[in-house]
Image: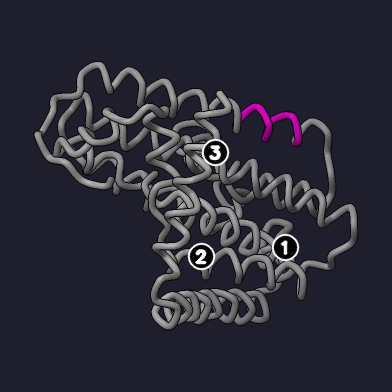
Amino acid sequence: MIATLRAIGATIRAAFAEAISNRSAFWSQVGAMILNDLGWVAFWVLFFNRVGRVRGWDSSRVLLLLAILATSAGLVLGLLSNARRIGNMAADGELDAVLALPVPPLAYLLVRRIDPVNLGDTIFGIILFLTLGTPTPARVAIFVAGTLASAVVLTGFLVASGSLAFFIGRTETSDVGLHAILILASYPADIFRGAPKLLLYTVVPAAFVSAVPTALVDSFDPVDALLLGGAAGLAAALGWGTFTLGLRRYTSGAVWTRA
């Protein structure tokens, strides 16, 4: 176990070193994403200034939702960027080099590559919360815990949807799953009704990526906290289980890469 943790730690350090090897490019990508996120802030502020509250949501709550979503999505797509690429790797037979290493394949894959542009989301989300999220010690603690749980849900969902490529040999499910969960998570769950809202809490757990953590920061509820923790545990188990089962069906592509 200790040897495995040391190997994963060394992989993380190598990924960071590779990501910041060109500092000017690194910070330009981060800055570009922050500017893109500012466009979302402007959109929601203008929207709520015109229409007022929508089913209990106003600009302050939606900006809090955006802060949580940006932070968690940035952590996943930035620090664990291979979570969105597992489907392509499986379909193209690019996992050979990973399977030859004395470390858990999924853990190695998740930390092997860092995408600098998405780290801009994390920086933006933290700054947005600290400036407009009315931070207090309690709200900061819930924000951190909720964001980490949100990141686990998102990672588990992306790994599970990407791992379907082991079984069906197609990568569309990974891309569709990524876009679906991010788009749905960027809107308050309460604006949906009936079957679409049920979808947000089950098949595409977008509500647990943004709306539920937002509600916890805004007004903590132990039941919602347990639901979020359970969703995170279920998503992690589903992602790991689907990937593990998929490896049993994996066919080598004789392609040796750094993953």
Compared to 4, does 193 lie above or below?
A: below
Q: What range of the chain is rendered magenta?
A: 225-231
Quarter of the image with the N terminus in it = top right
Q: Amino acid at mark 1?
A: Arg
- Is 38 positioned to the left or the right of 229 in the image? left
Q: Residue at x 45, y 48 (%)?
A: 181
Residue lying farthest right? 137
Q: Which residue is mark 2?
A: 119
Q: Amino acid at mark 2?
A: Leu
The dot on residue 61 is: 1
Going from N to C along the chain, the mark reached first, 3 or 2, is: 2
What is the spatial separation of the Cα atoms under label 3 and label 2, in whole angstroms? 18 Å
Cβ–Cβ under 8 Å for marks 1 and 3: no
Q: Which residue is mark 3?
A: 153
Secondary structure state at the residue bearing disc 2: helix
- Classify 10 Å Cα crowding around label 2: few (below 14), some (14-19), many (20 and above): many
> Residue 68 or 201: which is nearer the viewer?
68
- Classify 10 Å Cα crowding around label 1: few (below 14), some (14-19), many (20 and above): many
Compared to 250, does 228 lie above or below?
A: below
Going from N to C along the chain, the mark reached first, 1 or 3, is: 1
